[in-house]
Image (cartoon, helix red, strand yellow):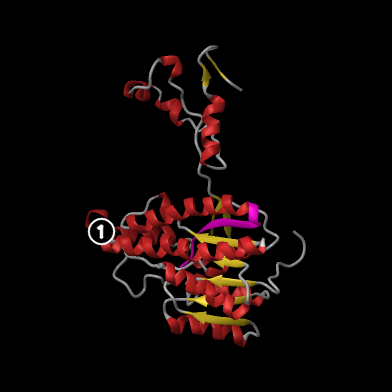
Amino acid sequence: MTGAIRFDGEVAVVTGAGGGLGRAYALALADRGAAVLCNDLVADAAASTAAAIGERGGRAVAEASSVATPEGGAAIVDAALDAFGAIDVLVNNAGQLRNAPFAEAEPDEVDALIATHLGGAFHVTRPAFRRMAVAGHGRIVFTSSSAVFGSPWQAGYAAAKAGIIGLGHTVALEGEAHGIAANTVLPMALTGIAEDGPPPFPPDLMRETVAALAPLAPEMTVDNVTPLVLYLASRGCTLTRRTFSVGCGHVAEVLLGVTEGWYADGDGPLSPEGVAEHLDEICDPTGFAVPGSMLDGARLIARDRPDPARGRRDR
């Protein structure tokens, strides 16, 4: 790409835009020319972000529907269309935390996390996707979390965030024919999301968390996340179906792939004993591959499967 990334004449929807990362995204998109629909369940917070954009010479409207229902998702997209007549960019950012040890996690608390994070991304993206498909262009950014690698006291949150990666991959595959690109970010920033809630972790885990993050804390700002999101939201971005870790001035692609593994054909039927014997081969990262879809994963297995008639792998 050459030149500054701009969004002149484009319309962006940002959920959870009342504070933290969402507010930063909305302000940055507006500063670069986008008209922005600022959604937040806290109406005053959404209005504050929209007002700040207006004070900076931009265009924005506030909207306070919940992302956690189909009706709320439709209302958010309709509000953008009513105000600005289009939707070119969607940043799914709305979220919440309800931490608890796994054995004590209440089903309704977990349901609420999944409804906001995974359900919210689905409910807002579906009507936005339909409009983008008609227009022949769109950029969608999903928000996951490094909690997908495992995070104590965050089973529901991690599960919801892991689901978002699969959702994003599928939206990207179906969107390609319509000029829609979809990517996912795992942001690292201190936003105060848990300030008004109960202690996020038990004391020992909290001490470990503070110790791990202390060297990074000065760089864990929203300004060190926003640039990647703006790039992924831009027309110049041709990447799709990708996942990125971003924060502290660092950007890296997160890969979900498969090892070359082991085929049982030459050793008789697959058995638990065979699995145990061949664990080193099964887990060997040499030949690690990143399938482009579920079907690509099947094609990789078929490609490398030993030929029973010849006793070798097809290459």
Q: Give the x, y percent position of residue 255.
A: 53, 45
Q: Residue furthest top?
A: 310
Identified at 46% across, 76% down, the residue is 40
Quadrant the N terminus occupies: bottom right
Circle 1 SS class: loop
Judging by the rendered image, the residue that carries numbered circle 1 is 105
Judged from this view, the residue extending furthest toward the front is 134
From where the camera sits, is residue 6 visible? yes
Give the class, few, some or many, for how many residues have Cα within 10 Å of label 1's Cα (few <14, many ≥20). some
The image quarter containing residue 228 is: bottom right
Q: Which residues are magenta?
A: 177-190
107 w.r.t. 149: above or below:
below
> Which image quadrant is residue 312 in?
top right
In depth, the one of 219 and 13 nearer the eye is 13
Q: Position of residue 293 (x, y in %)?
A: 54, 42
Q: Residue 78's x, y, as percent?
A: 53, 74
